[in-house]
């Protein structure tokens, strides 16, 4: 049996971001929002949202003639799980190599480093 993964595919994450933003949404709502960004089939959105429901990220309820979807977990919880899974898989559970990479690659700006340093001091 395949273990449940917390990591979402890029398309699933894109849809989840919209669902978190809208809170209650139909397939049509998400389809129209995605269509403003890129071409996508309605059935693709419907299938992906059904998959997200099966995986436990969305729940749906019948409202008139459409299903209304709602996230089952907050965005920060899902993103946090994805980050932990990534760190476990790529860096054997240690976040330090990731931070070193981000600093050396200049992906973390000085202002953010100062904020992180304050957060570290406060957590001691």
Image (tube, helix red, strand yellow):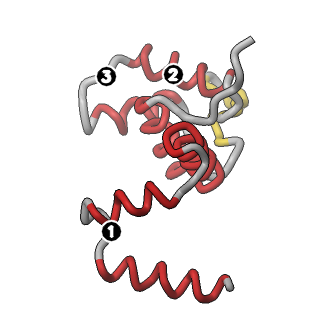
Q: Residue at x 39, y 62 (%)?
A: 100
Relative to residue 12, is residue 119 depicted above or below?
Answer: below
Upstream in sequence: badge 2 or badge 3: 3
Label 3 neighbour load within 10 Å: few <14, some 14-19, many 20+: few
Compute the Cα span from label 2 to label 1.
33 Å
Q: Which mark is residue 48?
A: 2
- The answer to whether the residues at label 1 and label 3 have Cβ atoms under 8 Å apart is no
Residue 50 shows which numbered tag? none
Q: Residue at x 52, y 49 (%)?
A: 22
Task: Give the distance between the C-alpha atoms of the residues marked 2 and 3, in whole angstroms.
Answer: 12 Å
Q: Position of residue 70 (x, y in %)?
A: 65, 40
Residue 61 falls in which quadrant of the image? Answer: top right
- From this viewpoint, is residue 73 visible? yes
Q: List x then y, in percent, for residue 55.
A: 67, 25
Q: Secondary structure at mark 2?
A: helix
Precedes in sequence: disc 2 or disc 1: 2
Question: Does residue 50 appear to the left or right of 73 in the view shown?
Answer: left
Disc 1 versus disc 3: nearer the observer: 1
Where does label 1 land, which residue?
A: 108
Q: Which mark is residue 40?
A: 3
At horizontal 44% and vertical 14% (from top left) the residue drawn is 43
Q: Secondary structure at mark 3?
A: loop
């Amino acid at each position: 049996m395949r273990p449940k993964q917390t990591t979402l595919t890029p398309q699933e994450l894109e849809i989840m971001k919209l669902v978190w933003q809208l809170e209650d949404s139909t397939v049509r709502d998400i389809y129209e929002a995605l269509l403003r960004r890129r071409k996508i089939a309605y059935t693709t959105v419907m299938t992906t949202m059904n998959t997200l429901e099966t995986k436990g990220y969305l729940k749906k309820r019948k409202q008139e003639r459409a299903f209304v979807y709602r996230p089952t977990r907050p965005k920060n919880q899902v993103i946090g799980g994805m980050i932990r899974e990534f760190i476990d898989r790529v860096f054997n559970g240690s976040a330090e190599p990731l931070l070193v990479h981000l600093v050396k690659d200049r992906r973390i700006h000085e202002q953010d480093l100062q904020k992180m340093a304050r957060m570290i001091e406060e957590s001691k």
